[in-house]
Image (spheres, helix red, strand yellow):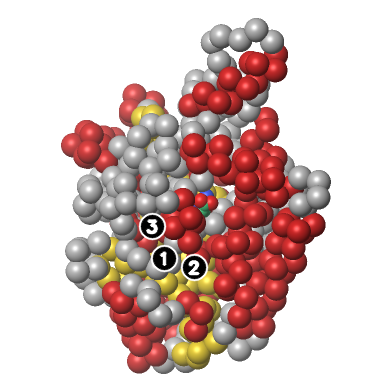
Amino acid sequence: MNIKEIHEKYRKKELSISEVVNDIFERIKSRENEINAFISLYEDEARERAVELEKNMEEDIPPLYGIPIAVKDNISTKDMDTTCGSRILLGYKPPYNATVIERILSQGVIIIGKTNMDEFAMGSSGEHSYFGPTKNPHNHEYVPGGSSSGSSAAVAAGEAVAALGSDTGGSIRQPASFCGVVGLKPTYGRVSRYGLVAFGSSLDQIGPITTTVYDSAILFSAIAGFDPMDSTSIDIPVPSIDEIFYEYDKKRYRIGIPDEYFTEGMDEEVKNGVLDVARRLEEHGFPIKRISLPHTEYAISVYYIIATSEASSNLARYDGVRYGYRAKEYETLEEMYKKTRTEGFGAEVKRRILLGTFALSAGYYDAYYLNAQRARRLIKNDFDEAFKDVDIILTPVAPTPAFKIGEKIDDPVSLYLSDIFTVTASLAGLPAISIPCCRSSKGLPIGFQLIGRPFDEKTLFQAGRFYEEFLKDEF
Ligand code: GLN
């Protein structure tokens, strides 16, 4: 059952919160051994909270009241482990909650556990976790995508009703697509980053992973909105669920299909699946238009310069003094730093720190970082231009469906290239949602992406909901 269905049953008193929590932990017991979606679980706490919430239940409960939710392990949760999938944060329990956590708790959410992820959110396969890879619930030999691998797999496997993830260059949208669930990256500045462990600060956003577009809107409207604790948070009103879905069945938005996202050599099943979504929308009155986003070809290079540069600076704080893990043997302070970081970080994180430090170093800064920032502006301008003629841009989420575990582990560049369709919206700060549309011949889910104007998540929800309600095949 999804959030909306459970909420309706709670209101009619047809279901108790403890029953739902019980079902969730039964499900976790039967599937978690294989899937490895969680780094930590809080079963006793969840059961206690369920009883507490039942006692205090009023007539008019908020939509998330009593809903069991999983949280990515880079979102700070007071007195609960927050490892970021890294050895270097073993044992670290933040003394405060992220703003998004405060917001969902105040609605009555039950946090059931913290989910597995690529270390510090660096990766697209869920394989770069200190706690071992997460498996795709649709086929355990395949990756679930990443870096919000555990959050997506947990929701797809019914181990959580919904989850929070984070997206820097696709980490909500791509695993949602690989696992057959819905993932939203909100507009940059829409959701507070206070308490989100920083990776690429100018790109990071927290967002919902759910089974439906409707649920995505519920969770989004709970976490979004101005927060004085985040200096990049923007004070723009957040639409309510009623406003979001007001007459959504009557709206016919203009949809752009960018040529650069349907290239030669891309997976035929992905291409045909996504173009079929466009065809169905067109049949139902959504005008479809071919558009061009000419600077797309630079997006991967730009993203990997900016994200690694910001990461190299953000990750300087893990020194063995302030958080988590510290090397056991050392003579000097300098040696303690070195050993802690050598032992604490995995290979991918070290690769990014090296790349980012290089890109920011004197003599190279102008050639790499500064040029990347300029190219970022050109990518943003492409979108501004396109949104003069269309309301939404429809694209694939990833060039292929989920790949096999181990297939790309020795080839970081090929993994980086697979982010091509998601990093653009991140660089431009735009909202984008990934929605399942079909399955590959191997039975693996394929999703499509809708990209919107800044702060126009509402249009994405409306069009996405239209597809989900009226055009989607049984999935
Ligand atoms: N796959 C991309 C990367 O490795 C995006 C990760 C993310 O969005 N956190 O950087």
The residue under the point 31% across, 77% down is: 268
How far across and how far down the image is residue 183, in percent?
43, 59
Q: Which residue is mark 1?
A: 398
- 128 sits left or right of 260 in the view: left
The quarter in which the C terminus is drawn is: bottom left
Question: Gap between marks 3 and 1, in whole Å?
Answer: 11 Å
**Is residue 417 visible to us here?**
yes
Tell me the element at label 2.
Answer: helix
The answer to whether 400 is drawn above or below residue 123 in the figure is: below
Q: Is mark 2 within 8 Å of ligand 1?
A: no
Q: Nearer the viewer, mark 2 or mark 3?
A: 2
- The structure residue drawn at horizontal position 64% and vertical position 61%, both measured from the top left corner, is 302
Dots 3, 1 in contact, CB < 8 A: no
**Disc 1 marks which amino acid?**
Ala
- The extreme front residue here reads 363
Q: Which of these two is toward me, 434 or 16?
A: 434
- Residue 125, given in percent of the width and then of the height, sits at 39, 49
Query: Which numbered mark, 3 or 1, is in the foreground of this view?
Result: 1
Mark linked to residue 421: 2
State the image quarter where residue 324 is shown.
top right
**Distance Cα–Cα, label 2 vs label 3:** 14 Å
Q: Residue at x 76, y 45 (%)?
A: 361
Marked residue nearer the N-terminal end (1 or 2): 1
Marker disc for residue 182:
none
* Residue annotated with mark 3: 176
Q: Earlier in the sequence, mark 3 or mark 1?
A: 3
Determine the residue positioned at 58% across, 21% down: 340
| Residue closer to the observer: 59 or 235 | 235
